[in-house]
Amino acid sequence: SNTFECGWLVRRAMQSVVNRLFAGLAPKDFGGEVHFMCTADVPAPAGFEGSWSSIVPGSKPQQPTWLGERELLKISAIVAISNVADDAQQQAITSIGSYLHLHALVAPPVIFIPVSDTSERVDQKIVWPFVQHLLSQAVIDDVAWGVPMGFAFAFAVQAKMRNVSAMLNQVQHDLCRRAALVENRDRMTDSIDFALWHYLGSRLLHNIPPVIDDIDDRNGQGVGGFRLGGKLCRGVFGLVYKTSRLAVPATDTQHHSM
């Protein structure tokens, strides 16, 4: 009896919150294919029957039509409405977030609307640890605080959708830029490896001139008993220099005279 009464009070409180949120709204006011998920067993607001799901706390999430991969591709965002002060509803939103992780490639962003069981605003200091946990585990993508009502609710959801879209675009841009840097690095590595171990090896094998150890390089200008002078001209085989015979050392003269 106490459990039934408690559940009835929770549903009644959530129904009151939902009525305030969706007062005077239609699905088109949210500017896209938005699906709404409520973690209490309350009926959909008028006009939202086709884009509404109630997740009964404590039960395992089934696979309703909107959770199929084809249906997820058509959804712009999921707006999750939950009373985070209720442990059962915390489990419900965590379980549905875990289910969406299984379809992460097609799952739309999740915008979280934390509500209370009264008409007052949610105390962020109290619920922030749980909300922070949802954000860190990527169960939700953004949070709309303050329980806006009517068109303010629609505008808040649209603003959060734009924020999430901009964030995802930035992440995609950063990933593409990093992938391009990695690709350029790999190409540069392959080019250096080819130049060092294939191209240079074959090119230098036959083009390095032989080393002549008996060239007189004491003054840097002696070659084969001749001293190089100034440049005269350029011939078929390269530059032509003026040369003069080097003086024969005294030791060599004495050796030949003997």
Image (cartoon, rainbow, N blue to C red):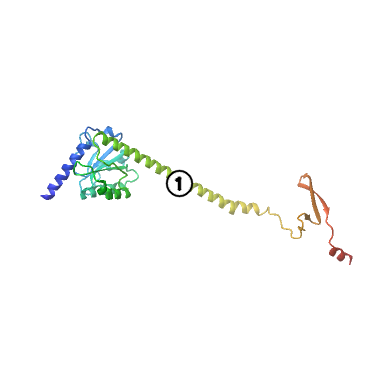
> Measured from the top left, where is residue 224 in percent x and y?
79, 56
Which residue is tagged 1?
178
Residue 54, located in which quarter of the rendered image?
Answer: top left
Against 213, residue 19 (above or below) is: above
Quadrant for the C terminus in the image: bottom right
Looking at the rendered structure, the kind of residue marked 1 is: Arg
Whether residue 162 is visible to the viewer of this picture, yes or no, is yes
Residue 155, located in which quarter of the rendered image?
Answer: top left
Name the residue located 17 percent from the left edge and 43 percent from the top edge: 11
> Measured from the top left, where is residue 126 in percent x and y?
25, 49
Secondary structure beneath label 1: helix
On screen, residue 115 versus residue 74, left or right, reads: left
> Measured from the top left, where is residue 63 in percent x and y?
25, 45
Against 29, residue 236 (above or below) is: below
Toward the left, the furthest residue is: 1
Residue 72, located in which quarter of the rendered image?
Answer: top left
Q: Along the line of sight, which residue is nearer the eye, 181 or 235? A: 181
Q: Mark 1, residues whose alpha carbon is within 10 Å: few (<14), some, or many (≥20)? A: few
